[in-house]
Each structure stands twice: as structure tokens, then as C-alpha cells.
């Protein structure tokens, strides 16, 4: 453990340099460099650990090899989030503190997703690299929400974070479309902002994407992208990055969740919930048992 702590401090100490200063290492502790265009970065695993020196981790610009020419880990606006991800990974590695997660019911999940889409800067800055992960509960009602997890760790999620996929999961990422910035392309051209809900998957600009997987994934694609999912929903792009318009964004996100959980996610008054509970074997997710019980008590009192 003492050796691990020492290696970790050295890696953090040099994070502000874009070039890999190898003079700080002992001759017996020099990490192997990357190949080709990644020569100036240390060769690291999906958990930011050196592939050649055990318990040596890298944060900041030196960890950019994992998203080189793919995301924003080259600079402070991006690597502040990968550094935080490394912190969570190390907490589990050395102290068995699992990745932070908040429990949400199916009924409350929609509001949380909308909030994250409009406020999560880590997903936006580290597009296609960090993802919010929703671990679907065994009861299909109580779920765990993990924020800004490196997608490269998904294959080893339980081993690296302490969180296990047992009943499928949902990912939320921000991504650009194919050929967004290729040569002779005007990324701000009018044609990039004429999509509708039906053509949102063709959007080239950055936009949120929800994916549903019934089972754990075996790995990423050759370009380190998430593999084909069982269900995918592209949220319609917005030039002002405002995804709060229900008719354009929220409604279709709700439909996507309803298709996964096979549940009505509309909100109902307690009295309506009580009536449905008395006449049906199942009721909407928003009609939680306490609401129905309170309505029943009020009716009995009256």
C-alpha cells in the first residue's frame, strides 16, 4: 500500500504537463509509453493504471491517451472529470468504497435524467467517454444511478467500481454524429439544425443518447465506442443546449423509458391512483403504495 500511495502522488504531481516528463521516474519504475501518435502519453489501462507498472496511476493530460482525438481529456475542462473518476476507482481499489450511487424509483427516474441532460457538465465535456449508468433493480422498480463513469470500465464494472449489473442497465452519454467536423463541412450550417424527432439519430451536432442493454457488455467497439444496444434513443439536438422542452425532448424520453419498464410513467392524483388500485391488478409507477394507502385512509375517514 505504501508503494501504491507513492506512485499515485508522483503521477498527480506531473498532471499539468502535456508532455510526459520521464525524468521523475526511478530506472526501475519507468512506465511504458504509448505507440505511434500516443508516444508522449504513458500506456494505461481503462482504470488509468500503467500497463507496465502496477499501482501507478495517471490523471490529467497524461490520461488523454484513452480519449485522444475523441473527447476533451487534453485540457482542464475535460480532465477534471476523469481525475474525479480516477478518485472513485481508487476508493474502491484500496478502500472498498463503491462508486457513489443514488437510488431512484422508476417513477422518479425521468426527472433525474432530464436534470442530468441539462446540467451534467462532465458528460458534455467528456462526450463519448463518460456516461451516467442506471443499474436496473432486480424488482424492476428501484434503480441505482451512477454519474460520469468511464465507458471503458463497463466491461469490468463490478471489479473496478463495486457495482454489479444484474438486471440490465441504461447509459446516458453526449456524442457527436458521424463526420461532424470533416473537411469542407460547415459544422454550424443550416442543414445541421433542421432535424426532427424522427431524424434525431442523423444529427451531427452534440446531443444526448440513451441506450438500454439487457445484459452486461463484453467490450467496446474497435473505436472505443459503446456497442449496439437493445434499445437506443437519440434526443433531438438543440443549438442552445437546452433540452427542457417537453414536447421536443421530455415526451420522447418518457416513451423510451416506458418501453423499457413496460410501465405508465404519467403522474396521477392520489385519488385516481386509489381507484386504479381497486379496479386493476397493476397501477402506474407514479402511484406508489404509500400514496394509495393514504388515499385509502382518507376515503375510510370520510
Image (tube, grey):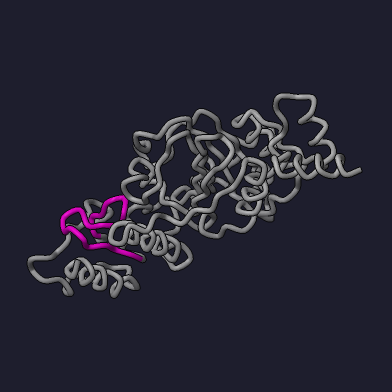
- Predominant SS of the magenta segment: loop
Residue 230 screen position, x and y as percent? 51, 28
Residue 76 relative to residue 16: left or right: right
Tell me which residue sits at (26%, 57%) in the image. 49
Residue 80 relative to residue 212: left or right: left
Tell me which residue sits at (57%, 57%) in the image. 120
Residue 221 relative to residue 286: left or right: left
Q: Is residue 215 magenta?
A: no
The magenta stretch spans which residues?
42-59
Residue closer to the observer: 204 or 169 = 169
Against 236, is 116 above or below?
A: below
Against 84, is 260 above or below?
A: above
Residue 162 screen position, x and y as percent? 36, 49
Q: Is residue 49 magenta?
A: yes
Please state the total of marks drawn on the protein image. Answer: 0
Against 221, is 133 above or below?
A: below
Quadrant where the C terminus lies? top right
Quadrant where the N terminus lies? bottom left
Tell me which residue sits at (22%, 63%) in the image. 56
Amino acid at each position: 500500500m505504501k508503494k501504491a500511495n507513492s506512485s499515485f502522488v508522483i503521477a498527480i504531481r506531473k498532471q499539468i504537463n502535456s508532455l510526459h516528463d520521464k525524468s521523475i521516474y526511478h530506472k526501475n519504475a519507468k512506465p511504458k509509453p504509448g505507440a505511434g501518435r500516443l508516444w508522449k502519453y504513458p500506456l494505461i489501462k481503462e482504470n488509468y493504471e500503467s500497463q507496465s507498472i502496477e499501482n501507478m496511476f495517471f490523471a490529467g493530460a497524461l490520461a488523454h491517451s484513452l480519449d485522444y482525438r475523441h473527447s476533451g481529456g487534453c485540457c482542464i475542462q475535460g480532465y477534471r472529470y476523469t481525475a474525479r473518476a480516477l478518485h472513485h476507482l481508487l476508493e474502491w481499489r484500496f478502500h472498498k468504497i463503491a462508486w457513489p450511487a443514488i437510488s431512484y424509483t422508476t417513477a422518479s427516474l425521468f426527472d433525474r435524467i432530464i436534470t442530468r441532460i441539462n446540467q451534467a457538465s462532465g458528460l458534455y465535456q467528456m462526450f463519448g467517454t463518460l456516461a451516467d449508468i442506471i443499474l436496473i433493480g432486480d424488482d424492476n422498480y428501484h434503480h441505482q444511478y451512477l454519474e460520469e463513469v468511464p465507458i471503458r470500465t463497463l466491461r469490468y464494472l463490478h471489479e473496478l467500481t463495486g457495482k454489479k449489473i444484474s438486471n440490465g442497465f441504461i447509459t446516458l452519454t453526449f456524442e457527436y454524429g458521424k463526420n461532424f467536423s470533416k473537411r469542407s463541412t460547415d459544422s454550424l450550417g443550416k442543414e445541421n439544425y433542421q432535424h426532427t424527432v424522427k431524424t434525431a439519430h442523423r444529427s451531427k451536432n452534440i446531443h444526448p443518447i440513451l441506450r438500454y442493454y439487457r445484459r452486461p457488455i463484453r467490450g467496446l467497439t474497435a473505436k472505443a465506442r459503446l456497442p449496439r444496444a437493445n434499445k437506443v434513443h437519440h434526443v433531438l439536438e438543440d443549438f442552445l443546449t437546452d433540452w427542457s422542452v417537453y414536447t421536443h425532448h421530455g415526451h420522447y424520453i418518457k416513451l423510451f423509458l416506458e418501453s423499457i419498464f413496460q410501465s405508465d410513467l404519467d403522474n396521477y392524483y392520489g385519488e385516481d391512483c386509489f381507484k386504479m388500485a381497486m379496479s386493476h391488478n397493476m397501477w402506474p409507477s407514479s402511484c406508489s403504495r404509500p400514496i394509495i394507502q393514504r388515499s385509502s385512509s382518507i376515503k375510510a375517514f370520510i
